[in-house]
Image: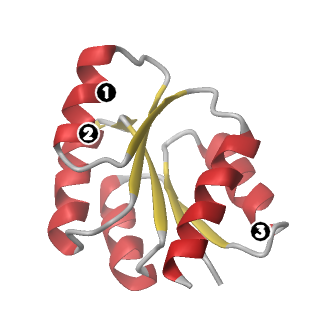
Amino acid sequence: MTKVLVIDDEEVLARTICSYLRRRDVEAIHALDRGDALSKFASLRPDVTFLDFRVGDADGLEILGQLRRLDPGAHVVMMTGHGDIELAVQAMKQGARDFMTKPVPLATIATIVAGAGEKSA
């Protein structure tokens, strides 16, 4: 079963994404802050992590670095409501596999997860 972690302090959005993925037989959990995110990432070992650029007062790029130290091959997709080219380039240079501006269509999320699930199978 594919495993997904959604790290976003917008609880309604995080729950919506997880609920949508669970209906597609994906193990999906969410984290609302940095500490919870790092703990869940270490225990879940997700196939894909969706990470908001701002998680409370934490910088998503810093969290991305911490996730990559825990798992250098982690498949992390950076999301933001305030996307610009410079931010996308920074995220990709630091190891994000993709960069999306919110609102991200749920079908797009499902496509990314399905691709990751195929690679891990």
Q: Identify residue type, mark 1.
A: Ala
Q: Residue at x 38, y 54 (%)?
A: 76
The reply to whether the C-beta atoms of the residues labelled 3 and 2 are less than 8 Å apart is no
| Left or right placement of residue 71 versus residue 18 in this view | left
Q: Is residue 73 above or below residue 55?
A: below
Under circle 3, the secondary element is: helix
Tell us which disc is closer to us: 3 or 2.
2
| Left or right placement of residue 6 versus residue 68 in this view | right
The reply to whether the C-beta atoms of the residues labelled 3 and 1 are less than 8 Å apart is no
Q: Residue at x 23, y 17 (%)?
A: 86
Q: Nearer the viewer, residue 13 or 98?
A: 98
Whole-percent x, y for residue 9 in the image: 49, 43
- Screen quadrant of the C terminus: bottom right
Q: Identify residue type, mark 3.
A: Arg
The reply to whether the C-beta atoms of the residues labelled 1 and 2 are less than 8 Å apart is yes
Mark 3 / mark 2, whichever is N-terminal: 3
Whole-percent x, y for residue 58 in the image: 26, 41
Q: Residue at x 41, y 42 (%)?
A: 98
Q: CA distance from mark 3 to mark 2?
A: 28 Å
> Which numbered marker is on residue 88?
1
Q: Nearer the viewer, residue 120 or 45?
A: 120
Q: Residues within 10 Å of mark 3 (few under 14, many from 20)?
A: some
Q: Residue at x 32, y 66 (%)?
A: 74
Q: Is residue 120 above or below residue 51?
A: below
Whole-percent x, y for residue 78 in the image: 40, 41
Q: What residue is shown with label 2?
A: 92
Q: Nearer the viewer, residue 107 or 82?
A: 107
> Which numbered marker is on residue 22?
3
The answer to whether residue 94 is seen in the rendering is yes
Q: Residues within 10 Å of mark 2 (few under 14, many from 20)?
A: some
